[in-house]
Image: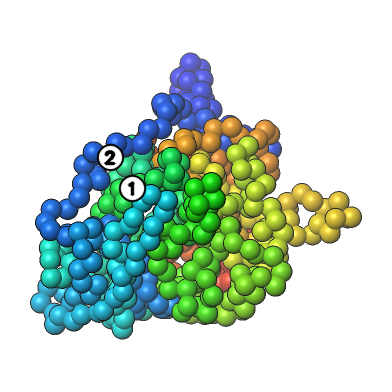
Amino acid sequence: MGVVEGLLALALVLNVVVVSNGGKSSLFIRKTKKTVDMPLGSDVFSVPRGYNAPQQVHITQGDLVGRGMIVSWVTMDEPGSSAVRYWRGKNGKKKTAEGKMVTYRFFNYSSGFIHHATIRNLEYNTKYYYEVGLGNTTRQFWFVTPPEIGPDVPYTFGLIGDLGQSFDSNITLSHYELSPKKGETVLFVGDLSYADNYPNHDNVRWDTWGRFTERSVAYQPWIWTAGNHEIDFAPEIGETEPFKPFSHRYHVPYEASQSTSPFWYSIKRASAHIIVLSSYSAYGKYTPQYTWLEQELPKVNRSETPWLIVLMHSPWYNSYNYHYMEGETMRVMYEAWFVKYKVDVVFAGHVHAYERSERVSNIAYNIINGHCIPVKDQSAPVYITIGDGGNLEGLATNMTQPQPAYSAFREASFGHAIFDIRNRTHAHYSWNRNQDGAAVEADYIWFFNRFWYPVDDSTVYVSH
């Protein structure tokens, strides 16, 4: 290679990443056009044909161990049936699960008829078909149950956060659907519809978001985390019940893990134990969420579910100037537990960009010893911010400088991620930006399990 060619190659490398005190800050140049919500007449918001046709169909895990499924949908013309008909394979015996119907009002909006039915005692690793809208216009969907829980069961999770319903949101969801590493379940880290960004928290935008995401969430469960855009607290228009639209529309199996609230709970799926926390519910000492988490973490059986994953909305480690330090009080309360119980990874949203941390902790500080800088800690989780789904508010492009040592890689782009568990010791993680081909991994690492293989898995970033 000649001198000129060598300089050109070096310039191309330097155009991808920049080295700082921490890891890498990507210099990938993305389009800077304003993020725009899709208009109400967009085809992704289309209402299904037929009288009282069920719409906004979505599923999530319906029990602790993956043998149940909550099926939810909305009918607009009349209540109709709240039952789900389901069967194994193409020609299995058809069974029926009865559900319940709820409605709500929000300011001058009246919801449709929202149905929730839980299918129980499903067989593991089995394809089921199901129908909703019995008695009127029936629609049919399918899902595949997870494998039976076990330490070496491979399983693939998709990661999406802060999705919204912009044109960029549509690109994110389409990219996820095209991923060659097919996610079997989505771990969603909060901020769904962004309806609260509209005048009077226009709840029509909850309906459009439900129809927009149906193409994925009617066929594979999304595991829900509540974000700040789900709070919908608006006393100026007489709405003082936090989380009203979200809690009516999106049910979760919180009671199965002895939680007293749908905003924090846990599930087991394949070889993972997943804990969902609420950044916007009380979490101080002696609160219900604190007490539940204190009791939940010792229950995790790493011989049964070796991978311990935590979902929350507000990140604890964030080197952007947006929402900087907002997760600090929760970190102070719970971080020592995460280290003690060797959480593998924490996924958060809220910041509309992407960031991956090193394994660090900041638990030594006691207000007088001055030890207030995060340090490398191989018993600590990796913290990943994945709030880059495509929301209306746009990208968080303003990063703190210099990049702190705890930050391994960061980039202000929209995208999604894949967490691909291979066995009890190894999982492959990758992040895909929307501008790339579906198979391109813009950031990737191998995770080594903190319980079964706790060797140093820090990375030197290699760009594609």
Q: Is residue 357 left or right of residue 123?
A: right
Numbered disc 2: secondary structure:
loop
Q: Looking at the figure, which quarter contains the N terminus?
A: top left
Q: Using the rendered image of the protein, determine whether residue 46 is visible from the camera's viewpoint.
A: yes
Q: Dots 2 and 1: beta carbons under 8 Å?
A: yes
The mark that comes first in sequence, 2 or 1, is: 2
Q: Name the residue under label 2.
A: 40
Q: Looking at the figure, which quarter contains the C terminus?
A: top left
Q: Quadrant of residue 119?
A: bottom left
Q: Nearer the viewer, mark 2 or mark 1?
A: 1
Estimate the x, y position of residue 205 in percent, counting from the top left. 35, 46
Q: Residues within 10 Å of mark 1 (few under 14, many from 20)?
A: some
Q: What residue is at 75 percent from the left and 60 percent from the top?
A: 363
Estimate the x, y position of residue 416 in percent, counting from the top left. 41, 47
Q: Residues within 10 Å of mark 2 (few under 14, many from 20)?
A: few
Front residue of 317/181: it is 317
Q: Quadrant of residue 123?
A: bottom left
Estimate the x, y position of residue 137 in percent, counting from the top left. 12, 63
Q: What residue is at 29 percent from the left and 45 percent from the top?
A: 174
Mark 2 belongs to which amino acid? Leu
Numbered disc 1: secondary structure:
helix
What number is the disc on residue 204? 1
Mark 1 belongs to which amino acid? Val
Estimate the x, y position of residue 343 in percent, counting from the top left. 59, 66
Q: Using the rendered image of the protein, determine whether residue 306 is visible from the camera's viewpoint.
A: no
Q: What residue is at 66 percent from the left and 58 percent from the top?
A: 330
Q: Quadrant of residue 168?
A: top left
Compared with residue 79, is residue 176 higher up or lower down, i.e. above or below? above
Q: Distance between the residues labelled 2 and 1?
A: 9 Å
Compared with residue 256, is residue 281 higher up or lower down, i.e. above or below? above
Front residue of 459/256: it is 256
What number is the disc on residue 310? none
